[in-house]
Amino acid sequence: MKNITALLLLLFLTLPLFGQQRARKEFNLPDILGYKTLKCDFHIHTVFSDGNVWPTVRPEEAWRQGLDVIALTDHIEYTPHDKDINIDFNRPYEIAKPYADNLDILVIRGGEITRGMPPGHFNAIFLNDASKIKTDKWQDAFKAAADQDAFIFWNHPGWEGHQHDHLARWYDEHTWLFEKGWLQGIEVVNTYDYYPEAHQWCIDKNLTMLSNSDTHDPVQMEHAMGIYNYRPMTIVFAENKSEQAVLDALKARRTVVYSQNRLIGDEKFLLPLFENSVEFLSTELELNGRGWANCFVKNNSDVEYKLVRASLNDIVQVQREIILEPGKTTIFGIRAWDRKRGGKQKVKLEYYLENLLVRPDEAMKYNLELTVKFTPSE
């Protein structure tokens, strides 16, 4: 009876997808540093734990929303639908993979180790057999994942279900996991919750930063397509789009967190992401007296960049804020303070990229250099 129910559910959920036109909305970010930029979500649930969709729906959603890689990570210890379907922890991956292959979506086998705090909830991805992490002792679950060369990361460390004040805390159990090498990353963002403590831990302990949707319902019920509520993603810089390359990139900490139009990570990735996203179309300007000149900037990405002036420039006057809208060319004005200034010189404008965080509450600084020819006027 359970198998018949599952089959009927599968047919119901996939029937509308056949014979109809579908469209993918790309989420544009440039490739950088010789790596391929992959949009990933490594924390996703299905009906095989407490999710409300069949596994085939997840790659379809990912394809439509411009993602490249997903991991199915159903709870190992919490399976409220077990009266309706036979729970096999490997089946979500097995069901989704052929469908994902047909959409060129890379799907990864995973599972969520679901324990009380401490240590809390952890995802183990790139598993060979998810059923082996169902153990009585949580320590044995981590060992079983590590024995499969899985990548293990801490989920929502400040989740209110564990921390009522929403503050992430590091316990002795986390030190034990870290020293074993079994704690390799942390969700700096889960759903729309940002954990600054986790952000700092990743910096201090050289852990991989992640951002995931943790979606349970159909994803568009939780994460729409607008700039500020687009689904959270882990941006991975990989040699290519393969399981091994993604695993290598995660272990090497080549990630940036994306959430609500914010990019969080190391400056060595954030800076080339920004510089390869935008084109300053006018870096050589002529200023006549106190007249204004236009600077043109084209943003080829789907991130809206917000530049806020870091300091006043004693040579030229510029706007305090510059918003670079996705897929658009923006104009901002510049003029000389002194109408009698003449000659040609380099001018450095100091800005903060307000939505690019290199540390908690610390935006990345960006220096825009222009060559300006000044023509004096009376």
Image: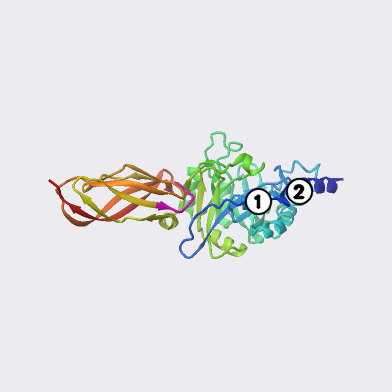
Question: Closest to the observer: 248 or 6?
Answer: 6
Residue 105 drawn at (x, y percent): 64, 57
Report helix, strand or loop for mark 2: helix
* Residue type of the residue flagged with mark 2: Leu
Q: Is residue 67 a member of the stretch shown in magenta? A: no
**Residue 231 shows which numbered tag?**
none
Report helix, strand or loop for mark 1: loop
Say few, some or many: other residues with alpha carbon within 10 Å of mark 2 (under 14 / 14 to 19 / 20 or more).
Answer: few
Say few, some or many: other residues with alpha carbon within 10 Å of mark 1 (under 14 / 14 to 19 / 20 or more).
Answer: few
The image quarter in which residue 372 lies: bottom left
Question: Closest to the observer: 36 or 47?
Answer: 36
Residue 79 drawn at (x, y percent): 74, 43
**Residue 15 shows which numbered tag?**
2
The N terminus: image quadrant: top right
Residue 130 drawn at (x, y percent): 71, 55
Residue at screen point 71% across, 48% down: 76
**Residue 22 shows which numbered tag?**
1
149 on left or right of 201: right
Between marks 1 and 2 in the image, the one whose residue lies nearer the viewer: 1
The count of marks equals 2
* Residue type of the residue flagged with mark 1: Arg
Q: Visible in this render: residue 41?
A: yes
Residue 101 drawn at (x, y percent): 68, 60
Q: Is residue 300 a member of the stretch shown in magenta? A: yes
The C terminus: image quadrant: top left
Question: Closest to the observer: 258 or 304?
Answer: 304
Rounded to the nearest angstrom, the CA distance separating label 1 from label 2 is: 13 Å
Question: Closest to the observer: 93 or 155?
Answer: 93
Q: Which residues fall within the magenta stretch?
A: 298-304
